[in-house]
Image (tube, helix red, strand yellow):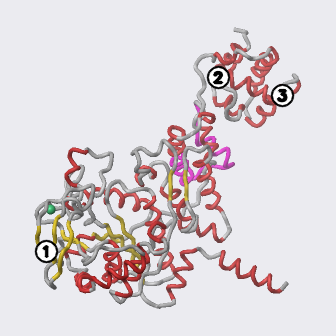
Amino acid sequence: MVVSLRIRASYSYTKSMFWADKIAKELSKSKKAQLVDDAKTPSGRVHVGALRGVTIHDLVYKALQEAKIESRYTFIFDDLDPMDSLPVYLPKKKFERYMGVPLENIPSPEGRGSYAGYYADEFIRVFNKLGSRPEILWSSKLYKDGKLDTQIKLALDAADKIQEIYEKVSGSKRPKDYIPFQPICEECGKISTTSATGWNGKYVSYECLENKVSWAKGCGHKGKEDPFSGRGKMPFRVEWPAKWVALGVTIEGEGKDHASKGGTRDTADAICREIFGYEPPYDVPYEHFLLSGKKMSSSKGVGVSAVEVAEILPPEILRFLMVRPRPMQHIDFNPELEYTIPKIFDDFDFARVSKEADLARIYELSQVEKETKKYFVPRFRDLVNLVQMPNIDLATQAEEIKGSKLTAEDKQALKERVKYVKIYLERFAPEEIKFTVKDNLPLEVEPLTEKQKKLLINIVNLVDKAGDPERLQNDIYQTGKVMGLSSSETFKAIYLSLLGRESGPKAAWLVLSLDKNFVKKRFEEAAGRI
Ligand SMILES: [Zn+2]
């Protein structure tokens, strides 16, 4: 008995601590300053999944800050990586020739600057909006400024050892005499096509091979390059740990594809220890963040970009979506399923007022600005109905639901929420929950029975005196019941007459949102009296 009580006590203790706070607590033991780092290749519009990485690292950073641990958060754009596929939204004619060229040397698809800069800026704007503001670093600049020189030399001098590590950890064979450096070809400007052939302590000699990769052609040039000039780079599995050492990174996670046994992370960790003599950063592997649904994949095969998803959810709710699950929990968000969007708003509003420690912490960390203002806002699904009703004052309706006057914060929250309700209705809401009051008597009233027609005439008399929707709703129901109609038959008569369909929002509210004379005339028409 005692044992089980103890287990329970310790379970509830761990449960009440948010995962990032646990990491901060663990790292605080070292008494050292911490550097959280994340990175991304800006190869095009950044996929929504990358937002999860930025947010996870941001959560660790914020937890460290709150625990008063000296810390920084850097985000590196790997802009020396080559263009290795052509995004479908770009003109093939203009960009095909850049396949294999480092992204920083490709012109921007719009305006001045580089291709890498263009897509990096787009991504930065999105994650800044979500409350993550890491210091931005560029791989090309780290190379040019000589920040990685020590690691480049160590790697080149230990090429054999690196090859051994690759084979030992990943189980895959590397070509013989593998040299861990790729120069940019001085003739054709490509980096994917070059293969280093020698290292003499000063220069890396290389060949630009015609068929090294299937997606870019090399020019056949043979040359030599100074590896400390910034005109070349280390392969990813060597460059990653090199950056950890050079910058002093102490926390960096990765998507689960890189985290598998014998995968990129394992190799990078081994190289970090054995070649650079540095203890690898604390690891936070994380699962995919998928957005499914047909309407969202605008660019074939590319999936949904971070920019696109930031248009359909407010920043704090998109952030909440990533803060709530643990890193290794899969997120599959399909906005086209009937309740996905209304539910995430409900969940957020629930967390907003929750007294439960876990949920309150999740809500707190979902904020994009420091101040969390208390406000009232009607449920998302109620607003879905209200915004579709004609001639309705939303603020008055919201006040009625709240039971008191709206504050300035309430009004602001309502305005913001309505914006996303409209986006939802326009783009994702299933047909069943959309409605419009028909200007003319819908043909769909044809199957109405004599009893239903009589009911409509009886409702005409109710409408005249009605003021309170609750009461009217009950009066309509009672009228039908007395006449021997089921609840469904009663309300169908109203929906068919006004909306031309069998279902709709709460009938009394709908009726009272309309001009009384219009409703009366419509019911009389439906009953065949006019
Ligand atoms: Zn070349």
Asked which secondary structure carries label 1, the reply is strand
Asked which secondary structure carries label 2, the reply is loop
Asked which secondary structure carries label 3, the reply is loop
Task: Say if disc 1 is inside 8 Å of ligand 1.
Answer: no
Numbered disc in front, either 1 or 2: 1
Relative to residue 455, is residue 106 drawn left or right?
left
Residue nearest the viewer, comparing 169 with 70: 169
- On the image, the x and y values in percent for residue 284 come to 49, 74
- On the image, the x and y values in percent for residue 321 come to 54, 59
Relative to residue 97, is residue 48 drawn left or right?
right
Numbered disc in front, either 3 or 1: 1
Residue nearest the viewer, comparing 173 with 394: 173
Relative to residue 46, is residue 296 drawn left or right?
right
Q: In the rendering, which numbered label is found on residue 319?
A: none
Task: Give the prevailing secondary structure in the magenta stretch.
Answer: helix
- Displayed quadrant of residue 10: bottom right
Q: Which residues are magenta?
A: 391-417
Along the polypeptide, which appears first: circle 2 or circle 3? 3
**If the picture is divided into quarters, which one holds ligand 1?**
bottom left
Q: In the rendering, which numbered label is found on residue 500?
A: 2
- On the image, the x and y values in percent for residue 98 come to 21, 54
Along the polypeptide, which appears first: circle 1 or circle 2? 1
Name the residue: 33% across, 70% down.
76
